Amino acid sequence: MLLLAALAAGVLIGPASLDPGRVMLELLDRLPFVSVDSGLDSRSAAIVWELRLPRAVLGALVGSTLSVAGGAYQGVFRNPLADPYLLGVAAGAGLGATLVIVTVGSGSAVIPLAAFLGAVAAVAAAYALGAAAGGRRSGVTLILAGVAVAAFLTAAQTFVQQQHADSIREVYSWILGRLGTAGWSEVALMAPYAAVSIVVILFHRRLLDILAVGEEEARSLGVRPDRVRIAVVIAATLGTAGAVAVSGLIGFVGIVVPHTVRLLVGASYRSILPISVIGGAAFLVLADLVARSALGPSEIPIGVVTAFVGGPFFLLVLRTSRRAM
Amino acid sequence: MTRLTASGVTVRYNGRVAVDGVDLTVSVGEWVALIGPNGAGKTSLLRAMAGIVGYSGEIAIDGVDATSLPRRRAARLVSLVPQQPILPEGMTVLDYVLLGRTPHLGYLAVETEADVKVSREALARLDATDLESRRLGELSGGERQRVVLSRALAQQSSVLLLDEPTAALDVGHGQQVLDLVDELRRERGISVVAAVHDLTLAAQYADRLALMDGGRIVVEGTPTEVLTEESIQRFSGARVSVVTGPGGEVVVVPRR
């Protein structure tokens, strides 16, 4: 319901003021076996079909994926602060994608692949650094390592970006996170990443709960923790890479959504992850709505909106989870 | 009938020997208590039996070498209640107990109604039905122990390994837990191996005691055979009197 309402708002509200009733009729018209005349002219219909709807759908896909990936990282690393953004995964994906944009161009289908490679390297580096510095038990160490990795990769990304003045604007607006250029082609690019990532992680949701009771008990229950970890991290990283490739760096979604769900339904990933799929989609579509309507015709980068919400939220999580670490 | 056999089991942590060539046989429905001072190797032996630490030697369950069994199969046969289990604070009790069903489910399967039923029955057995929707972080020590035991019960294994099951409990709750374990092994023929600190409780509940010291089993037998003032003094360094209680049971009383 929430998701439907958010999607509807995403389609109905926009700078070109269209009559909401007519937009709804236009949407209905496209359903199979339904034929109504919405009364929208072809230009307005195009706004609905080519701008607003793909944007809302892409926002939903990216939101779901980032939320589920965030929940997955929290489960795998047994760390309530883990998030694709904080672990440096998004920064790694950003560097990979930037390299492709400056060398090949922004429309390239290689972008998600490069983003994935960058993301995998980043998560491996964060985990290795965190483990070397403080062992697996310390949650804060992992996040510090992630922040260090993210800072390094962001610096590298900025360097690459500055070296290529011709594409600097393009890269810059992309890196702040945006859904503004979303079209059906981006939706098509993102959909397989989202689907694979979300499906794999959801299949592992019960196993993530088993990781939560510790390494040894997981084994005494007949589960190989390493196998679960690798499968889930790859899936979450793949989803993050896809999301970064189409929408740039949108932070904090992976921490805000799963934690809100956790507060509502309890700490079992068996319920957190499925609900995060819906909640994440609704959250990002609404955040996008704010991003494009808060300041009139000009847009705020959506990454800025999610950070406004997510920054304070992160502090809240840090405060309440200190005991657990 | 033999259920579990350990032969020449040795556990090393980074070269340090924690369990040193232990032989132990546990029959169907039998209760063996591991006693001995801290660091004697009781926990390590239990961990080897549960298959969560590497060991040399052989542990066989129903005559089959445990290392040759797939992990999930082995987990259907042996369950372990660790001394300090990790309980994720925000998880609900039922969600936690359901994790005990893991070895009965496919890798990516979801629990069915039948699994929920088994888990609820396990909770009911431990008088913990009303805890079902509470979060783990809110439970008292006694409640936690009952919930962890419920999870092991939901695992429906034929061997139950308990590491200091009563350490966190007051006398009343301790007895309740041990009585329940005793009932289960009588009803279902579950074999129990438990590390127990309290020698009197060990003598009251176990069929056989194995006194461990320095990674070996040094004395093994019925409570009256094992619990002598001399052996306790020698291996635990404790001054005790061993007396006979009103029901003819062995009672170990510390002396000043």
Image (tube, rainbow, N blue to C red):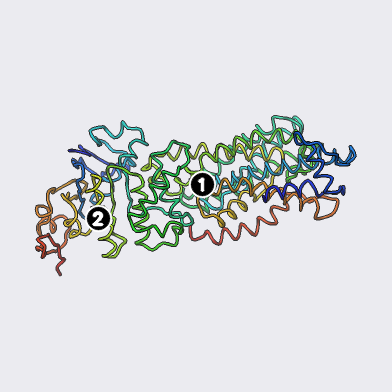
Percent position of residue B113, x then y? 44, 44
Percent position of residue B1, x then y? 17, 38
Task: Note whether residue B146 is visible.
Answer: yes
* Residue bearing the label numbered 1: A270
Percent position of residue B117, x then y? 40, 47
A134 vs A198, nearest the viewer: A198
Residue depicted at 20% across the width and 48% down the height: B31
Which secondary structure, mark 2?
Answer: loop
Residue depicted at 55% across the width and 49% down the height: A272
Percent position of residue A281, x then y? 67, 46
Circles 1 and 2: CB distance less than 8 Å? no
Which secondary structure, mark 1?
Answer: helix
A245 vs B90, nearest the viewer: B90
Labelled disc at residue B38? 2
In this rendering, which labeled residue sits more in front, label 1 or label 2? 1
Q: Which amino acid type corresponds to the residue marked 2 in the rendered image?
A: Asn
Q: Which amino acid type corresponds to the residue marked 1 in the rendered image?
A: Arg
Chain of the residue displaying label 1:
A
